[in-house]
Structure formats: C-alpha cells, structure tokens
Image: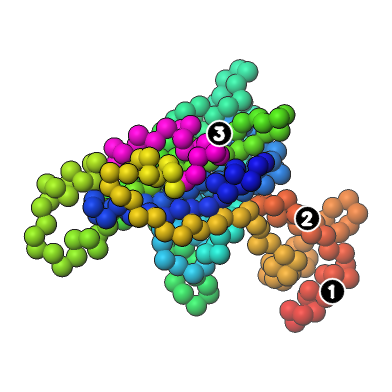
C-alpha cells in the first residue's frame, strides 16, 4: 500500500458547516478493517456487515464526549446472530461476528456469497441494535437500544437518533472488498451530518423555516457523495469535504487516528477465570488437558495448565 493511500486511511475527520449550523464526521478505514476481517477469514456476506458496523462505530463514538469504551452490538435471529465492535477513546478498534453457515447459505441463495444491498432483514432477521458507553466501574453506563428497522445499518442508525437522541442526523455508509495486485483489501467509509442544538441555544430570532432549509441542504450535499469518492484511497478526506461542501466553507478539525488493536491479555483472562469455579472448567479443557480460552475479537488463544490454575486460584483466595 502506497504512502498516499496510508495517509487517507484509518482516521476520523471532524468538520463543521457554520453557515448551516451543522457538524459532521468523515470516517475512512482500510488497513484496520483488513487486520480484523482477514484474520478471521469471514465469508464476504459476513465481512461486509462487520466492515460497515466498524465504520459506523467509529463515526458515532467520535461524535461523543466520553473516556472509555463505545460498543456497537447487533443481535438477531437471522444467519448472523451476533455482531460486536467497539472503540476506545484512544482509537483502538476491534470487532467480530457469530453466524450460522447453513442459514447464511440458504438466505443468500444458490451460488451467492456477497451480502446484498439492503441486507439487514435477510442476514440479521428480527433483532436489535445496542449502543453502550462504558467509562469504568465508578461511572454509570449509558446504553441505547432500538429495534433493527430498515434495510441498511444507516437506516438502523437513523432509527436510533430519531427515537433516542431526537437529533436530526444523516449518515451514509459504504464498504467494499477489492483485489489489488492479487491481494484483497477492505475499505470502508462513513459520512455523517448532524444538526447542532447549541446553534439555537438562547436565541429568540431563529427562523425555523430557514433552519429546516439549511438542514435539508446539508443532507442533500452529504448524500451526493458517491461510493467511489468515499472509498478512493487517492482522494484525501479534506479534498472530498471541500468538493461536497465548498460553498458552505467547511471548517475541518484535527483528524483522529484509528488502529486495529485488541484489549485482551493474559491478565484479563486470569480475572475472568477467577470468576468461575475451578470444578466448572472441564468444558474448556482441550485434548492435552489444558484449559484453553480464545479471544473472539483477535483469535488469540490462552492456554492454562494445572500449575497456571493453581496460581490463579491461589491469588483469588
């Protein structure tokens, strides 16, 4: 991957359209998606929803003020029964999916492997979309839950903002897998605009019709971005924003980098095992008799022999 491409990947570019009273985010991910998706070897019909969810997660998380972990989770009764992705405030992104291969093949139809446009009802079925902000054990967790309503993840996000935040929001999400020089690569992008409630705070001279017109204009300009533009590794994000909103003089802020990084560690697994009675670990033992624990996010395996278990449970006493 060339230098120009790497400079235009794996970051969130915040911007503001002061003339319209609108703020926004442009998210572009490349190597971070590859690091997660290719490691798991997900089929295309699972990989694309995960890629789009990771892009959406980065978009929503960086629009909030928090210090901790933002988690996006989708559960359903369809072929993909669980999809989870999260982002820390320092930009560490990860994700994974659980699915039924047989149900997936039936849902896609004979000979098909790609997720169709508008895949949410077909691949997730009836379910819900959950957003969680966890800022540590001494703070209360925030959680928003909405039903999976709509054909796309962007539709589901719109449902969340309409029902939970009641904040006019427009989101466009794209993700595709391409092959360059024989090597597959994932790219994903999201563009979000959001009305600024503080723009109206304390003002009595607001022209509501003009506010509505300004909002419609912002959404139309956002929607005019093509998939090719959003995914083009040779097109800098700043250039794309200027191309879309140049008449509104977009004000851009410092990009926030995103990196694929799991938070699992042996110390964390130790703490999990301490919470399980030792006599209940039989189902976790592998053929060699060791207790084996695999991280769903990064596929790292942690093995514990009896000596390791002695150490863990002795420290818990």
Q: Residue at x 31, y 39 (%)?
A: 221
Residue in front for this viewpoint, 22 or 317: 22
Q: Which residue is mark 3?
A: 176
N-terminal label among 3 and 1: 3
Q: Give the residue number, with chain letter if any, for mark 2.
A: 301
Q: Report whether 203 appears left or right of 187.
A: left
Residue 229 is inside the magenta segment = yes
Report helix, strand or loop for mark 1: helix
Outermost residue toward the left? 205
Callout 2 secondary element: strand
Location of mark 1 (residue): 310
Q: Can see residue 185?
A: yes
Mark 1 in CB contact with mark 2 (< 8 angstroms): no
In the image, residue 173 sits, relative to residue 291, either above or below, namely above
Q: Which x, y percent locates residue 103?
A: 60, 30
Please report whichever mark, 2 or 3, sits nearer to the chain's N-terminal start. 3
Give the number of the mark in front: 2 or 3: 3
- Left/right placement of residue 107 relative to residue 167 reads right
User: Vertical placement of 23 versus 305: above or below?
Assistant: above
Q: In the image, which residues are magenta?
A: 218-237
Residue 59 in percent (x, y) is at: 45, 51
Is 256 inside the magenta-drawn segment?
Answer: no
The kind of secondary structure element at disc 3 is strand
Image position, residue 216 (x, y; %): 23, 41
Q: Are marks 3 and 1 in contact (CB under 8 Å)?
A: no
Q: Are marks 2 and 3 in contact (CB under 8 Å)?
A: no
Q: CA distance from mark 1 to mark 2?
A: 19 Å
- Which disc, if any, is residue 33? none
């Amino acid at each position: 991957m060339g230098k120009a491409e790497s400079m235009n990947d794996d970051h969130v570019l915040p911007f503001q359209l002061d003339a319209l009273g609108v703020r926004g985010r442009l998210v572009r991910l490349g190597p971070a998606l590859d690091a997660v998706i290719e490691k798991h070897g997900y089929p295309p019909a699972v990989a694309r929803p995960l890629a789009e969810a990771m892009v959406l997660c980065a978009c929503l998380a960086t629009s909030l003020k928090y210090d901790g972990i933002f988690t996006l989770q989708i559960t359903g009764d369809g072929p993909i029964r669980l999809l989870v992705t999260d982002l820390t405030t320092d930009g560490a992104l990860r994700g994974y999916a659980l699915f039924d291969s047989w149900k997936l093949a039936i849902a896609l139809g004979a000979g098909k492997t790609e997720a169709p446009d508008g895949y949410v009802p077909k691949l997730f079925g009836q379910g819900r979309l959950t957003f969680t902000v966890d800022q540590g054990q001494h703070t209360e967790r925030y959680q928003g839950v909405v039903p999976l309503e709509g054909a796309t993840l962007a539709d589901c996000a719109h449902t969340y903002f309409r029902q939970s935040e009641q904040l006019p929001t427009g989101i466009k999400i794209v993700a595709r897998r391409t092959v360059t020089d024989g090597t597959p690569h994932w790219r994903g992008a999201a563009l979000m605009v959001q009305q600024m409630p503080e723009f109206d705070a304390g003002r009595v001279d607001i022209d509501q019709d003009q506010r509505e017109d300004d909002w419609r204009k912002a959404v139309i300009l956002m929607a005019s971005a093509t998939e090719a533009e959003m995914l083009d590794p040779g097109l800098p994000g700043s250039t794309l924003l200027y191309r879309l909103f140049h008449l509104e003089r977009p004000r851009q802020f410092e990009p926030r980098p995103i990196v694929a990084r799991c938070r699992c560690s042996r110390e964390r697994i130790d703490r999990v095992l301490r919470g399980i009675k030792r006599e209940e670990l039989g189902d976790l033992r592998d053929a060699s008799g060791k207790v084996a624990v695999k991280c769903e996010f990064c596929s790292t395996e942690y093995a514990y022999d009896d000596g390791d278990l002695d150490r863990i449970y002795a420290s818990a006493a």
